[in-house]
Image (cartoon, rainbow, N blue to C red):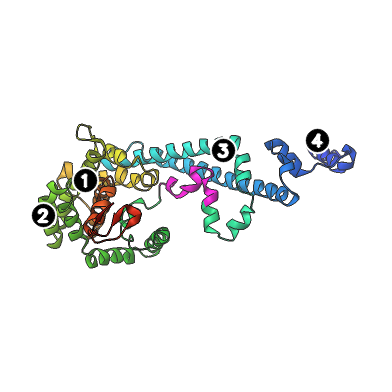
Amino acid sequence: MDENKTFVELALEELQKNDLEEYGHEIILEEYLARELDIDLDTVNEKEKNVLTKNFVHLMCTVIDDLRSIDKRLSEYRERYEFLKNDRSNAAEFKRRKIQYFCDINKNARSEILDFVTNGIKQYLLDNPFDTLARVEGDDKLAVLFLQRRYKYAFYRSFYDMDYDYGACVKISELHNDAPMNKWMEIEHEYLEIKKTDTEEFKNKLKRIVEEKNIISEILNRVSGNYHLKRREEIFETLSELFRAKKYQSFIALGLIQLEGLFYDYCQIKYGEKENQGTLVEKVDKALKSNEYKYMKFYPYFAFDVPIMRNDVAHKGFVDVKDLEWTAYELVLDLNTVSKMVRSESYDKFIGFSMTHEAMLKWTPEDNDEENGRKRYGVY
């Protein structure tokens, strides 16, 4: 015995001398995997067996990466919370709530992933009989989207990051509706990349859009033309005048109150007038919770960032920011997004009636439409 070697090193050397022949058979990985996952190999051919094994390896590497990213975030967020623990300011309170929110959703994501590892791997492999790694490496967007259905974290990964620019997403979300739907995410990504690399260019780009599209007038027209929002018409006329006159401090102070008011209207439309709407954060929660995607994308901004300024107005009577002009433009875009949400909520339930009404307005007795029971000069 070599006294300079540990017991573990000696044991490993001995094990390495042994080969598969000593055990009388060769362990076939595909068969082992199928046995552990209770997959009937009689239903798959040799090529599919190889893909099954390859996909399992790819899946587990992906799952490990997801779990590591969650653990890294949680560790970082705990440090941030500890740093703010003794800060009693209004801003620090909302920052702590924001940290707690992201800790909670990341912990929930970790539990969901572990549940998938326990119960979902077999079905995932059977549902995806193609080479998943090749599709991902080949940037096959449709395949990647399909694979991300395995659990929510894979689909919404960016929205588990506290540092994701949720505020920019809110402002951008209603600026590209004229583009094809399949291009929306791409356009949004372009905006976010501009902000990362050149903040001033991002600001100037959005300011130009506000001016060129005359968004403040669009908001006023939206409010004036909607049954539920019309009672705010006079206030939004004042907001429009303040913004055009560049009286930004007054515009922001009044606009922030109306932003909360729009969420109040949203909740009234959705739940009825007798419902207690609660605080701004509670209103936002009620307004967004029926749409998982919008909730994860919009909630952090409206629940944790906007209330800081809103409370400044409530307690100080003004907002204390360095760039009042840009803050005013940001608020215009926030009002644009939320007013569209309210109008949509009030309008969607009547879409069927509206379409029927529009068709009836276009129809004349002379139309010949046998498919729908009409003939020239009358009705069947």
Q: Would you name the residue on which mark 2 appears?
A: 238
Name the residue type under label 4. Phe
SS type, badge 1:
helix
Q: Earlier in the sequence, mark 3 or mark 2?
A: 3
Magenta stretch prevailing secondary structure: helix
Q: Would you name the residue on which mark 4 appears?
A: 7
- Mark 3 and mark 2: Cα distance apart in space: 54 Å
- Mark 1 and mark 2: Cα distance apart in space: 16 Å
Residue 82, located in which quarter of the rendered image? Answer: top left
Name the residue type under label 3. Phe
Q: Which mark is residue 116?
A: 3
Does the CB distance between marks 3 and 1 fall below 8 Å?
no
Where is residue 171? Give x, y as percent: 30, 56
Please give the range of residues in magenta.
Answer: 146-162
Between residues 55 and 298, which one lies in front from this camera angle? Answer: 55
Q: Residue at x 72, y 50 (%)?
A: 50
Does the CB distance between marks 4 and 1 fall below 8 Å?
no
Circle 2 residues within 10 Å: few <14, some 14–19, many ≥20: some
